[in-house]
Amino acid sequence: MNATKRLSREMNKLFRTSSKGRGLPPGALVFVGEEREEEPKIRVIDYDMAEIQEWKEATVQECVRLKETSTISWINVDGLSNIEMIKELGEAFGLHPLVLEDILHTGQRPKIEDYEDYLFITVKMLSFDKKENLVDSEQVSIVLGRNYVISFQEKEGDCFERVRDRIRNSKGRIRKMGPDYLAYSLLDSIIDNYFEVMEGIGNWIESIDMEISSGFMKDAPKVINSMKKQLLIVRRSLWPLRELINTMARSENTLITDAVAIFIRDIYDHTVELIETMESFRDVLSGLLDIHMSSVSNRMNEVMKTLTIIATIFIPLTFIAGVYGMNFANMPELNWDWGYYMVWIVMISLALLLVLYFRRKHWI
């Protein structure tokens, strides 16, 4: 898929509207997203301080049995096209039909909703394709329960491998803390990935700046406009995320302990930093566009200046040539033996005088 089509796809996802589900009652389950060939699958990691079990392909029934255990279960669903599986899993864990509807509608704005027994969170997971310089977005829905975390992704492949590695190898606090810390870790990984995206965008902007400064970028407006669209995708993901994390940090729900709320406040600071970086990139892009337009205008002015000087030099020469080209019978100079040469001397002298005058004025 070429870069233009991918960018168009991401912009469609950003402003997605669909006729699917219109006219249906609230909570009706209809998948609104990009259809994929891969079959959805469930991956499970069940752990406590002492033991860990992992299933790369689990069934809904196996997930339901984990609901009543004392261990912490992370149930990750890759792919949302199997509506019956999503519905069965949601009913087994007591998820509200509107929650399931939001999971399947992948154009959701990042948000958090408190359902007392569980928290429902939707965020955008971003990645940056360095080959095509494109931002790719994917909706991730997270359900935080008493002893479980369920995450729903549009496709296989994510930025959570570091979290899985920490669970498998018992690194850090994750095996000692509750499911709220696991949910925090997932959000933290998503936000850390935003920094990688911003780094990729920053490197691209730097390369654009160098090309514009060197004057070798003819399609600068098109490239800058493309990058502004990329930043719009990031902006629409980041601003609601800041509000989401702030709400989560101040939540009075007992699912989030005071110990984890401190960590959540830390990623709030990271989100603010990302927003400031993004806004500075937007300002830089606007400045680059102004610089490019000024450069084009200056080059055009130089061309017009050169043409004007040439035209100015030839105006008196054209006048003289026009006078002596009128073919009147009674023109004394036509009978002079040195008339032709005198006209040339006068014309060349005028041209040299004009050139010297322009040089003295520093116009050439």
Image (cartoon, grey):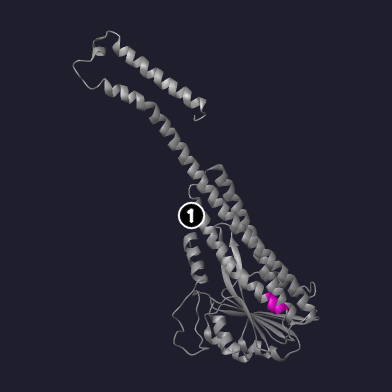
Image check: 264 left or right of 203? right
Quarter of the image for residue 311 reads: top left
Provide the major secondary structure of the magenta segment. helix
Image point 66% across, 72% down: which residue? 242
Q: Which residue is mark 1?
A: 222
From this view, report whether residue 24 is shown above or below residue 140. Answer: below
Image point 20% across, 15% down: which residue? 330
Helix, strand or loop status at disc 1:
helix
Magenta stretch holds residue 247: yes
Question: In the rendering, at what x and y percent does residue 140 appear?
Answer: 61, 75
Image check: 115 left or right of 177? left
Q: Count the marks: how many? A: 1
Query: Which is nearer the eye, 273 or 42?
Result: 273
Image point 59% across, 79% down: which residue? 41
Name the residue furthest top.
Answer: 337
Image check: 175 left or right of 238? right
Question: In the rendering, at what x and y percent does residue 39 appear?
Answer: 54, 78
Classed neighbour count for the residue bearing mark 1: other residues with Cα under 10 Å, few (<14), some (14–19), many (≥20): few
Image point 39% across, 29% down: which residue? 312
Magenta stretch holds residue 92: no
What is the three-letter code of the residue carrying label 1? Lys
Query: Which is nearer the eye, 117 or 77?
Result: 117
Image check: 263 left or right of 154? right
Residue 139 in view, yes or no? yes
Quarter of the image for residue 171 reads: bottom right
In magenta, the rendered stretch is 245-249
Quarter of the image for residue 344 reads: top left
